[in-house]
Amino acid sequence: MTDLAPILSAAEKDFDQSLERLFTLCRIPSISTDPAHAADCDRAAAAIVADLSSMGFDAKARPTPGRPMVVEHYTPKDANAKTPHVLFYGHYDVQPADPLELWKTPPFAPQRRKDADGIERLYGRGTADDKGQFMTFVEAARAWITATGSLPIKATFLIEGEEESGSPSLVPFLKANRKELSCAVAFVCDTNMWDAKTPAITTRLRGLVHEEVTITGPRIDLHSGMYGGPAMNPIRVLSKVIAALHDKTGKITIPGFYDGVSPLPAATKKQWKALKFSDAKFLKEVGLTVPAGEKGKSVLEQIWARPTAEVNGVWGGYTGAGTKTVLPSQAHAKFTFRLVGKQDPEKVLKAFQAFVKARIPKDCKVTFSGRGGGSPATEIPENNPWISKSAAALKAEFKRDAVLMGSGGSIPICRSFKDILGMDSVLVGFGLNDDAIHSPNEKYNLASFQRGIRSWIRIIGGLAS
Ligand code: BES
Ligand code: MN
């Protein structure tokens, strides 16, 4: 096996430049969900192409009906039939930055800051999710090239720009380029460590399905004195729908919702118990004390192995300053459902719609305006050789065993990699629970970036041996 010392030291020497390359990317507000930022997404894709090209790679930003896809294929000169070919996946799009007033420094002016606890962190939207994360493998590849002139593996880089809005263009893109994109395995850098000292490989992700509901009562907004009483208020109807979603034990009441959800195997339960996760500490960090999921299930089980029904936003009527005696014509809410096991996104959506319709009184009507789609949960077999190789590399870096863990989040593409390209994913990431992804003051620890790069250098080395 290649001596990794010169490669690790090349990364160390170049670290300030690595940070600068990351910050250049973080300055671009590549928010995929907002069409007003389409040009910024194009700019981010172009910046990544420039970055990869500066390493001698031949990367391209490929157009899609949505945001461009950055693709690069690398074959080392001395490649032979045994040289493994792996794919590295990340996403350059980010979540919207609002509420802006809660940011201590502007979201798209990334900053390296030493906090009062003595820990250095990188602040800004995308520093963690996912620019800081995917740049760890990009910078690791750069260190390999700098120190040895090449990578010891065949590598395809796929950096998309629509992950945060459900990857609508990625599935058709995978189908259209099946042969080109099929590799032995996909490495995804978009998940967390177990804690700041302990690396992790994520083997379960929840699925996701969205819906948006509008309930209309009277034809127009009304004076709540002239009509209040006889006129049905759609916010009242919507509140009842929302209140009916969960029973007293935290179970979701939609008929058929749990179809495809199996109880956690005893062995897995035992494995998770051994992780000694503190429910109290986890909740305390976000200002809470009482788990609100299904009664009798541990917090880890609630996040990793149970589905949810969440209201993400509710609006309607007057919400400005002061009071307005209005009886609104409409009430709206956005919902998402996290899915596990074999739950079928389409069936869950239909069951939810029926649940809502059954609660709409005469004189009100409901419309659903979700974009459809959705993705089922992903479970990755833990006994695959790519996982053992990655675990060994992580252990060499952190001097601790990698935890095989679940995640409550969703990365829909992992399922598509499997279903369309027949590839398993290995999810290795360096995020932490307190990174505040999707929130104000998102950050990535400097150590995550640094050790992330070092870990990928080792993983790449391990793949070649
Ligand atoms: N990186 C996250 C998923 C994640 C978060 C994995 C925390 C592990 C730990 C990803 O970018 C994300 O946020 N995905 C969205 C999916 C989506 C379709 C909008 C999610 O989970 O909400
Ligand atoms: Mn992400």
Image: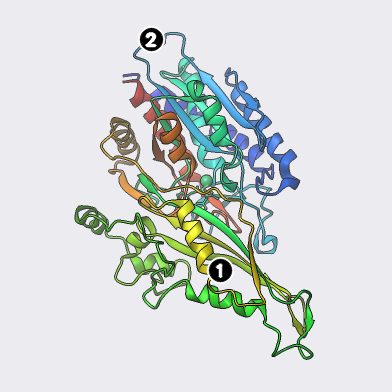
Q: Nearer the viewer, residue 336 or 184?
A: 336
Quadrant including the C terminus: top left
Badge 1: residue crowd in 10 Å (few <14, some 14–19, many ≥20): some
For this view, does 367 lie left or right of residue 299?
A: right
Q: Is residue 278 above or below residue 372?
A: below
x%, y% of residue 158? 53, 30
Q: Is residue 12 something that shows in the picture?
A: no
The mark found on residue 246 in the picture is: none
Q: Amino acid at mark 1?
A: Lys
Q: Is residue 115 above or below residue 180?
A: below
Secondary structure of residue under mark 2? loop
The residue under label 1 is 357
Q: CA distance from mark 2 to mark 1?
A: 60 Å
Query: Residue, x 65% and y 60% (percent of image)?
Result: 104
Disc 2 versus disc 1: nearer the observer: 1
For this view, does 439 lie left or right of residue 47?
A: left
How many marks the image carries: the answer is 2
Query: Residue, x 37% and y 30% (percent of image)?
Result: 459
The residue under label 2 is 80
Q: Is residue 413 above or below residue 360?
A: above
Confirm if mark 1 falls within 8 A of ligand 1.
no
Q: Amino acid at mark 2?
A: Asn
Quadrant including the N terminus: top left
Secondary structure of residue under mark 1? helix
Q: Nearer the viewer, residue 278 or 259?
A: 259
Query: Residue, x 37% and y 24% (percent of image)?
Result: 461
For this view, does 362 lie left or right of residue 88?
A: right
Q: Is residue 55 something that shows in the picture?
A: yes
x%, y% of residue 6? 42, 22
Q: Is residue 289 above or below residue 18?
A: below
Q: Nearer the viewer, residue 259 or 337?
A: 259
